[in-house]
Image: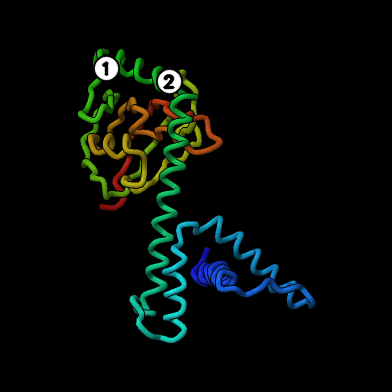
Amino acid sequence: MNTIKLFAVLIALITLSSCNTNGVTNKELTSEVDSVSYAIGINMATQMRANFTEVDEDLFIQGFQNGLDSSSMKIDAAKANSIIRSYMMKKQVAEREKQQQEALKKAEVEFAEVKKAGEDFLAANKTKDGVLTTESGLQYKVLKAGSGAIPVATDKVKVHYHGTLLDGTVFDSSVERGTPYQTNLNAVIKGWIEGVQLMQVGSKYRFFVPQELAYGAFPRPGGKIRPFDALIFDLELLEIIEK
């Protein structure tokens, strides 16, 4: 809801409520303008209930009256829009976080077995010969050593990769497409950001990525990756394109 609509809703709901409490009798609908006016009031009140139930009616009426006669204003009129906008943005953020937490709880129940399978795999995998584990839990194995430069997170790199689920299902592969992939390193999953910075140009690593360093509970919709899937990437660092 934009600021203009918000003001209209507040004015319609609170002013009508104030008038009724001050003894103004209900009017009959005797013309088309009367009906349209009443319908607009209903529409705005409905929006008000859906978007801003927290309003303090007394303070709204006070602010509305002060704004009409430009007297005793507690807030400068020029700042009103920014105050409303800031509040509504915070409310939207809070609502998104609430929805995300609810979705997370649902995913943790529905995909608990997927999460456990990844944890069990990684626990066994880290004991295998040649597998190294970083402090974050990222596991990797050097398939081919390189001798070139080592990228940093702000670099743009060119790589070839082959990504699979733990059961071998291929979910994405630049190798199969036959076209190397270019990306800003800090724009990919955490497992890649950390892992590629371990590599020299010309090297090829196999990464075993815990779900929390991959897509966690919220993979891209419609793909083969499920919530909490641990992933495996064979990744070859071909070039640092931009430093």
Observer-nearest of 35 and 160: 35
Which residue shows up at 30% across the image and 13% down it? 124
Q: Is residue 154 visible?
A: yes
Observer-nearest of 155 and 70: 70
Which residue shows up at 70% across the image and 68% down it? 39
Amino acid marked by disc 2:
Leu
Above or below, comparing residue 52 to residue 215 in the picture: below
Instruction: Please state the horizontal and vertical placement of residue 119, each as a whole percent of the image.
Output: 34, 19
Mark 2 lies on a secondary structure that is: loop
Circle 1 residues within 10 Å: few <14, some 14–19, many ≥20: some
Q: Which residue is mark 2?
A: 166
Which residue shows up at 39% across the image and 46% down it? 182
Instruction: Please state the horizontal and vertical placement of residue 128, each as a whole percent of the image.
Output: 27, 13
Q: Which residue is mark 1?
A: 126
Observer-nearest of 165 and 33: 33
- In this rendering, would 154 be left or right of 181? left
Amino acid marked by disc 1:
Lys
Mark 1 lies on a secondary structure that is: loop
Q: Quadrant of residue 80?
A: bottom left
Q: Is residue 174 visible?
A: no
- In this rendering, would 151 be left or right of 65? left
Q: Quadrant of residue 208?
A: top left
Above or below, comparing residue 48 to residue 153 in the picture: below
Circle 2 residues within 10 Å: few <14, some 14–19, many ≥20: some
Say the numbered circle drawn on residue 93: none
